[in-house]
Image (cartoon, rainbow, N blue to C red):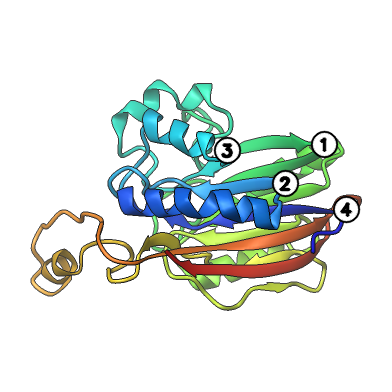
């Protein structure tokens, strides 16, 4: 049961392809009625045939009750994104891209007088070179707190589990919650850290169970075992698993009071 003193967030892992989208749309309407979230966040960097996002798909996500879309290293793969990313502040790209990069790295959401900031950041270990996520997020957190915003959430899009854990510990007590994305593999280490920041290494994906991180198995064989330059494509058949988290945060002080995994087969 959700307390009136708490602000509830539902965040979902990378939605992979058309099958992931359709399953998410089927799931989220009933889930919102049951769980009554104040804010719904999804990672949308794989939502358009496995790579990138289009304007039409973005609009579908918003129409189905998504409030904020985060992304990661695949955000630029559909070139049309450059036509609209500056115009949509609730579609985020990692904040630690260079300062002149198109788009937004943080979005301030408000519901019933309560403000919550969502920051999108990206790791650097086994990833492309990019500005320091720790310094960039820390600077942004300072600005947000100067505005009186207590609830601060971070999607940390990163490969290395160690980097994600370091990020969680570094920001414990400075933000309300941080969750990892990018690997598409949901971890079972969700917890509230000692200084009341909710943490999980990776929230997983919304995609096919019988796949390799949402992509076709046979293509993955050829790419990894035979070292052939095969393009990945989403596995669009079979059962889909919806993966994510629910976080409850105290409205008055921004401290996390609950974190629970979502894992449901559609």
Residue at x 75% of width, y 55% of height: 175
Per the image, the residue denoted by label 1 is 112
Which numbered disc, 1 or 4, marks the residue that appears first in the sequence?
4
Name the image quarter holding residue 104. top right
Give the residue number, with chain letter if any, for mark 2. Answer: 38
Q: Earlier in the sequence, mark 3 or mark 2?
A: 2
Determine contact: label 1, label 4, CB under 8 Å.
no
Q: Could one spot residue 256 in this view of the protein?
A: yes
Q: Which mark is residue 232?
A: none
State left or right for residue 205 relative to residue 114: left
User: The C terminus is located in which quarter?
Assistant: bottom left
Number of residues whose C-alpha sits closer than 10 Å to that of mark 2, classed few (under 14), some (14–19) or many (20 or more):
some
Ranked by sequence position, the earlier of labels 3 and 4 is 4
The image shows residue 36, relative to residue 191, as above or below, that is above
The Cα–Cα distance between marks 3 and 2, rounded to whole angstroms, is 21 Å
Residue 84 in the image: state x and y as whole percent.
43, 23
Tell me the tag on residue 105.
Answer: 3
Total number of numbered labels? Answer: 4
Dividing the picture into quarters, in which one does residue 2 lie? bottom right
Q: Are marks 2 and 4 in contact (CB under 8 Å)?
A: no
* 2 with respect to 217 (left or right): right
Tell me which label, 2 or 4, sits earlier in the chain.
Answer: 4
| Label 3 close to label 1 by CB (< 8 Å) | no
Q: Earlier in the sequence, mark 3 or mark 1?
A: 3
Q: CA distance from mark 1 to mark 4?
A: 12 Å
In-front residue for pair 72/143: 72
| Residue 58 position by quadrant | top left
Instruction: Identify the element where label 2 is drawn.
Output: loop
Residue 4 has which mark? 4
**Callout in the foreground (3, 1):** 1
SS class of the residue under badge 4?
Answer: loop
């Amino acid at each position: 049961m959700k307390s009136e003193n708490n602000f509830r967030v539902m965040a979902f892992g990378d939605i992979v392809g058309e099958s992931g989208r359709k399953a998410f749309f089927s799931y989220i309407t009933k889930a919102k009625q049951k769980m009554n979230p104040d804010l719904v966040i999804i990672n949308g960097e794989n939502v358009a045939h496995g790579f990138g996002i289009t304007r039409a798909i973005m609009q579908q996500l918003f129409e189905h009750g998504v409030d904020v879309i985060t992304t990661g290293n695949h955000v630029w793969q559909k070139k049309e994104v450059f036509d609209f990313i500056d115009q949509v502040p609730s579609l985020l790209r990692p904040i630690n891209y260079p300062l002149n990069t198109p788009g937004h790295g943080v979005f301030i959401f408000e519901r019933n007088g309560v403000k919550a900031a969502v920051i999108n950041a990206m790791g650097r270990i086994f990833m492309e070179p990019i500005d320091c996520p720790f310094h960039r997020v820390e600077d942004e957190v300072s600005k947000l707190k100067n505005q009186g915003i207590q609830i601060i959430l971070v999607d940390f899009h990163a490969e290395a589990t160690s980097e994600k854990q370091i990020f969680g510990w570094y920001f414990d007590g400075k933000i309300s919650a941080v969750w990892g994305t990018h690997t598409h593999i949901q971890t079972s280490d969700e917890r509230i850290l000692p200084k009341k920041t909710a943490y999980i290494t990776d929230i997983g994906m919304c995609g096919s169970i019988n796949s390799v991180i949402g992509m076709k198995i046979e293509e993955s064989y050829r790419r990894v075992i035979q070292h052939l330059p095969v393009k990945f494509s989403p596995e669009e058949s079979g059962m889909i698993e919806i993966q994510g988290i629910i976080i409850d945060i105290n409205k008055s002080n921004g401290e996390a009071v609950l974190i629970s995994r979502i894992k449901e087969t559609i």
